[in-house]
Amino acid sequence: MLCGGSRVLQHLSDHHHHTSIGLGLGFCGARIVQLSSFFLRPCQAMKNSRFSHQRMISSSGSYCRTPKDIPILHNCFSQREDDPEIAVEGLSPVAGGIVALGKFDALHIGHRELTIQASRIGTPYLLSFVGMAEVLGWEPRAPIVAKCDRERVLTSWASHCGNRAPAEYEIEFSSVRHLTPRQFVEKLSKELGVCGVVAGENYRFGYRASGDASELVRLCEEYGIGAYIISSVMDKNQDSGERDSGDSKDRGQVSSTRIRQALASGDMSYVSELLGRAHRLILRVRAQDMPSERRISVPRSSVLNLPPGNGIYKACLLLVGDDEPLIPCSVVVDTSNIHVETEDLRLCNSDWSQESKLLGVEFGYSQS
């Protein structure tokens, strides 16, 4: 049984044709700039009885599905170790799925758009690479999103993705670094068993980024994988004079570089626009980090992701736990510490029996 037994998309000649065809298949929200003509191979997932009720990709817009038992990251406040990956023997966890390709440091609105398009074709996944900085010798830097907070962000995307939250599947960068573009696509096809990929128009892959989006389309067609290339999500509020990221590849698109620069300048309204949500800072707090009943002061070494630049931030919210109400607070960021002040006394009443606990701070739009 084929995942898609007939040619389901053809090269499209103009934007209007893109839109009309795309809507028929559930594409909207971003202009599709290129779609491959392809035949989808038999889904590897169909080899196992757990997939007997999967729907197939066809010209009517149905889609491949993968098992519901997908590995997830626990949220920050549970403080549990990640569960081992759950996988069907002989199949990768993403077999039969649609994977979004890119660097997902920030999980910004451009990344969300990739997953939206993936969800309109099948079961969406983010294919992330870990250990890239170590392999390439980059200076270590704090992530924009704390690792333990990524699942929460992806879950929040479910409303944009047909009520299906994308899952994240990680690959060690060292295992793919030296792969040619062809070898990388072959890995997607034969080892991971994906039905399709979604990437941005500026996506590059393979050893020394030698492959581009057009080569991805060509190779995917050769290996029987659906390839969907979408236009970049642009920064609507960019100002050529003030928003220059200094990146030669920057053409005004939303990027992690822009978000890091906006955080450094303390422009939290701009950060929120690029992320599509308020920036959440995760703090590891001990009882001794509370110098008074309404104040928390933690060293930067206890911060799990990137804080904004030095300054005073008002209209913030403190999250003590999953089931606790949000507490209004203000935040002071200085060179050495993060200080959180609140008028609420619940901090003193919190359970501090553990050596430390994780708290979240969501930043409002005002800085003084």
Image (tube, rainbow, N blue to C red):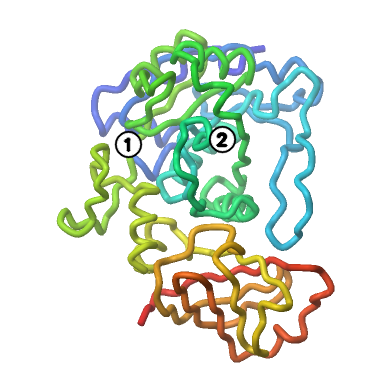
Q: Is residue 28 left or right of residue 118?
A: left
The residue most toward the left is 241
Amino acid tagged 2? Gly
Amino acid tagged 1? Ser
In this view, the residue in front, 55 or 334, is 334
- The image quadrant that residue 72 belongs to is top right
Residue 19 shows which numbered tag?
A: none
Q: Position of residue 65 (x, y in %)?
A: 65, 30
In this view, the residue in front, 50 or 245, is 245
What's the residue at 42%, 50% (across, down)?
A: 109
* Residue 277 vertical placement versus 104 (above, below): below
What is the distance, in whole Å, between disc 1 and disc 2 at their CAs?
Answer: 28 Å
**Please, what secondary structure does the residue beneath circle 1 have?**
loop
Q: Which residue is mark 1?
A: 231
**Please, what secondary structure does the residue beneath circle 2 have?**
loop
The 10 Å Cα crowd at callout 2, few under 14, some 14 to 19, many 20 or more, is few
**From this viewpoint, is residue 309 visible?**
yes
Q: Position of residue 250 (x, y in %)?
A: 26, 42
What's the residue at 36%, 69% (across, down)?
A: 266
Quadrant occupied by the C terminus: bottom left
What's the residue at 67%, 82% (across, down)?
A: 290
**From this viewpoint, is residue 62 visible?**
no
* Residue 75 vertical placement versus 51 (above, below): below
Q: Is residue 1 left or right of residue 186?
A: right
Q: Nearer the viewer, mark 1 or mark 2?
A: 2
Q: Position of residue 18 (x, y in %)?
A: 32, 30
The 10 Å Cα crowd at callout 1, few under 14, some 14 to 19, many 20 or more, is some
What's the residue at 33%, 66% (across, down)?
A: 265
Q: Which residue is mark 2?
A: 131
